[in-house]
Image (spheres, rainbow, N blue to C red):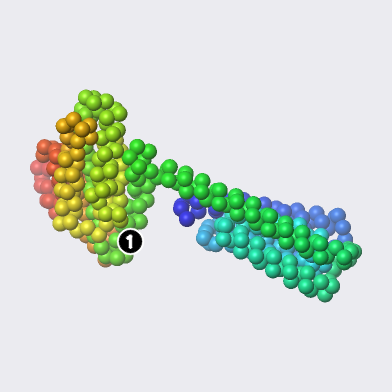
Amino acid sequence: MTGLDLDYRHRTTLRFSRALMIIMVVGSIGRTFIAYLPDFVVWLGFFNVALAVVAYLVIRSKRLLHYESQIVVALCFIYVYPLFFTTGGVNSQYVYFMTLIPMVAALVGSVRMTWTVCVIQLLLIVLLFMLGDSIPDLTGYPFIEEKTRVRSVWLMVGVIIASYFGVYFRTAYDEQSVMLDNLASVDYLTGLLNRRALKARLDNELQRSARSAQPLSVLMMDVDFFKQFNDQHGHAAGDDCLIKVARCLRKHTRAEDIVSRYGGEEFLIVLINADVKETLTVAEKLRQAIADLDPLACGDNISVTIGAASMAPATSLDQLPEAEDLIREADEALYRGKEAGRNRVEYFNRSETKAIKSNPAYT
């Protein structure tokens, strides 16, 4: 589950738990004015109100962020099923709530949760039917026993239909969420990750590298004299050039490496479990592969300048550099390469940088 999806579900469950709380308060107070209710129903209403308030406050605090949908669905069961077992089973005036629970599961949960709720409810309906006359009706409302069988069947049909449409909604929403997340994470021109998605992936990889004590490297790449290329051949040719560079980068990197378009004619590659020697080898291979490209098939080759920076294996999370710092170091190496003549690989050496900055002549 993505961060955006988790945030959406939190907001949905928060709103739904707030609505449940309001319904419980209004319903528990209002029904005492509508009809006479046994004491157990009144006290059950007060219990449900207290439970709804506690659930709302817990969800609002985000303390159980990954279990909020289960809490809401469990509350629905707790609210209604004690009433079924004390007000005539399937003959209860509260049975119409059964079909709402699968819809709630679909709204705040998942497809799996919805079908699970459906199966549980079908089993409970069968249980209520089998118990039959042994279930008391403490409210005193009369029911025709001959209708029990028909009501049970239609209750099961209603639960199945509600579950089906709930699953349809959940599936459609999940598909749309994946599509929107991809659109928000992928650069429309090159098909590579965009800058936003890169930041999230790099943060995760830094954490993973620290846990596994593996090195990690970043390559910042810039297409040389790209503005001149655009001015000479046009923006369509420039776009085609960037697409071919992107394909070349993806072809000459491993599946686990992260390749992204950082902006304009800049690309950023994260090399997983790559030390300094391997990083420089890969960077030179990429530089040479792009130098061999002829994007226009007319003899006009292009070149790139690459800045590299590495993170040594960290022994703890406290030693981790920030993603921005690692990118900044690669970017600094990139500009050194540009100043040195372009079409080359430049490595960011932290010890050399410290020595330069400690020199009084450094400005």
Foreground pick, 195 / 320 = 195
- Seen from this angle, which residue lies furthest front? 297
Q: Position of residue 25 (x, y in %)?
A: 73, 56
Image quarter of the C terminus: top left
Report if residue 197 is visible in the image: yes
**Left or right of 29, for residue 74:** left
* Identity of the residue drawn at 80% across and 54% down: 30
**Left or right of 160, for residue 218:** left
Q: Position of residue 253 (x, y in %)?
A: 25, 51
In the rendered image, which quarter is residue 56 located in?
bottom right
* Identity of the residue drawn at 67% across and 52% down: 19
Amino acid under disc 1: Arg
Residue designated by label 1: 208
* Identity of the residue drawn at 19% across and 41% down: 290
**Left or right of 171, for residue 363:** left
Foreground pick, 211 / 270 = 270
